[in-house]
Image (cartoon, rainbow, N blue to C red):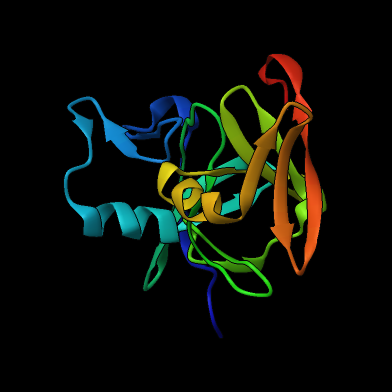
Amino acid sequence: MSTKPAEIVIRREDAVFRLDRRGRWCNEFGVFRNHRISEYFHSAIRRDAGGYFVCQERESLTEKVYFPYEDTALFVMDLTLGPAITLRLNTRRQTELDPAQLFVAGDSLYLMAGDERIKFTERALMKLAEVMDFTSEGYFIRMGGRLYRIRENSGGET
């Protein structure tokens, strides 16, 4: 007979780390310097009705730490250009870009995936710049031989 693992839940306001608006993990001393620890935290992001949390499971214990974030918990960290554009998120999930789901708010580019808002990091934007245009009419992205307009939200509203 298997028993359900014990669960430790840390509330958002009690977390000792947070995710900043650029997708960097931080604590009271500043940005995490160890890239491997940051990658581990990113890969452990999950979501439930209570929000985003970092999850760690060990033998008979599950630890969930709900964490604060400044803008969003999901980021496009890298991408591959081609006939289809493949996005790699901070959670390590990969997805194809749907240009209809892109929007600009403030000085940032976002993608909606269902009810989740995903922000492009500076690195991802640099790569995407190859297929983007800006004119007096707005922002555009070139994909599959077509030009798609990227909608804009004034005032940074998302």
Q: Is residue 143 above or below residue 123?
A: below
Q: Residue at x 17, y 27 (%)?
A: 29
101 relative position to 2: left or right: right
Residue 14 in which image quadrant: top left
Q: Which residue, as the protein is rendered here, is positioned at the far front?
A: 136
146 relative position to 158: left or right: right
Residue 98 in which image quadrant: bottom right
Q: Which residue, as the protein is rendered here, is positioned at the far top?
A: 155
Horizontal and vertical percent for residue 128? 54, 53
Q: Residue at x 57, y 32 (%)?
A: 108
> What is the number of callouts on the image?
0
The residue nearer to you, when weighing 76 against 2, is 76
Quadrant of the frame with the C terminus? top right
Horizontal and vertical percent for residue 8? 44, 49
Horizontal and vertical percent for residue 105? 66, 27
Quadrant of the frame with the N terminus? bottom right
The residue nearer to you, when weighing 94 against 82, is 82
Q: Residue at x 53, y 74 (%)?
A: 3
Q: Is residue 128 visible?
A: yes
Q: Residue at x 77, y 67 (%)?
A: 145
Horizontal and vertical percent for residue 43? 43, 61
Q: Is residue 117 visible?
A: no
Q: Is residue 153 above or below residue 139?
A: above
Q: Is residue 116 above or below residue 130?
A: above
